[in-house]
Amino acid sequence: MHRLVCVLSGAILVSSCLPVAAQEQAAPQTAPPASATVSGRVICGDTNHPARFAAVLLIPEKPKPSDTFDWANVKNEKDLAKHFAKNLSQTRKGSGLSAVSTIDGSFEMPNVPAGTYYVVAELKGYLSPLSELSTAERMIGGPDAVKKVQAQAEKIVVQDAAIRVDVRLERGGSISGVVRYDDGNPAPDVKAVRMVMQDDGKWKVDTFNPSMPATTTDDRGHYRISGLPKAKYAVKAELPTDQSTSGLGPGSLDRHPNYGDALVVYSSGVFREKDIKPIEVGAGDDVDGVDLVFPVDNLHEVSGAVTAKTDSHPLNSGWVNLDDPETKTMLRHTRIEEDGSFRFNNVPEGQYQLVTSRAGDVDKDASGGIVQMMNPTFLKTYQDATVPIEVKGDQTGLTVQVAEQSAAKPPAKASTP
């Protein structure tokens, strides 16, 4: 009898375990996300040779939105360090959706997540859909930027099988010339910046486009801007007023910014955008002899102080612009110094407007640095002011008085029924 009980107990125990074991075996396994290898070759269309060390990128059909950053939330250096650390971490991580072609023009991207992409290749001197985007469009993305890429790039759909896609690059046009002073001396280390005319006749300027960076002149003042699609262009340059110097040993690196000296000249030999004569560049055209000349004579100083209209005390923060009175275009800008002064050097003769912006009394005891520059601690803020001036000679001792901003009104109380 005892033996029978043991056998029955064992049978019950085994049978009670069977459903659990069956459930464990039937539990669904999480499948790894689908991915595939994307490979191919990049060819130069004008030579039929490999495009060596070209960047190849997969642009998702629906890119992830970029994180926006509000400087108003930065109160101290710790907040700033967190922001930079986050950006650095994202940069190091990368997207995994890019490659660089080898000596034979081939490239390979393993483990590309399933999805729809547009294939773009970039090589200096050749056309790319990305080179036509502004910095903001490229960094932030968005529907308009994606549409521009979609209109020119090849579309691929990645699932679970390897994909091969070849890219053929077409050479773009170019503009070249010399930047010099009107006494004949070359202007080295000056950025020659492309400008492209939009459909509405306005100029688009993008100095910091990573795929179309400004070209810096060599020791003879020569520059060459390449990779240009067919369009109307101009070139601008400004005096190199933000300089860095380095001596020996740690701590010897110094910056010497002087924004007020940044005289701008354009390829038509003019100082204002409205007077530019466009340069037409066709597909693959090389346009040479587009020189930019800085004058060294008939330039003047415009200087003064920004003060409060109530008691005439000098303000210690803000900006002063030199604007074109007709188009309201900003021609130059400089900071209001701690003593309220401002100064522009190298100003050509003509009509201008002095325009103040973000003027205020800043707490001098607040921590300085980039945080205080971008998000100052204001004790008082003031309205923008505009003063017309005519420059025929030096204009010194000017005073721009600004009115205090009115205090914000309290929100209206909700009406009761």
Image (tube, helix red, strand yellow):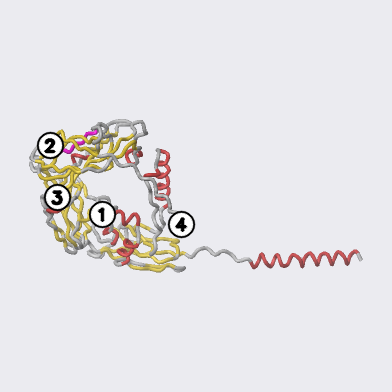
User: Do residues under tags 1 and 4 come within 8 Å of each other at their CB atoms?
Assistant: no
Q: Give the prevailing secondary structure in the magenta stretch.
A: strand
Q: Position of residue 252 (x, y in %)?
A: 30, 31
Q: Alpha carbon of mark 1 to alpha carbon of mark 4: how far?
A: 61 Å
Q: Amino acid at mark 1?
A: Met
Which residue in the structure is indicated by mark 3?
A: 272
Reading the chain from its start, which is encountered first: label 4 or label 2? 2
Reading the chain from its start, which is encountered first: label 2 or label 3? 3
Q: Alpha carbon of mark 3 to alpha carbon of mark 4: how far?
A: 59 Å
Which residue in the structure is indicated by mark 4?
A: 417
Q: Amino acid at mark 4?
A: Pro
User: Do residues under tags 1 and 3 come within 8 Å of each other at their CB atoms?
Assistant: no
Q: Amino acid at mark 2?
A: Gln
Residue situated furthest right in the rendering: 1
Nearer the observer: mark 1 or 4; the answer is: 4
Q: Is residue 25 left or right of residue 92?
A: right
Report how many numbered discs are placed on residues in the image.
Answer: 4
Q: Secondary structure at mark 4?
A: loop
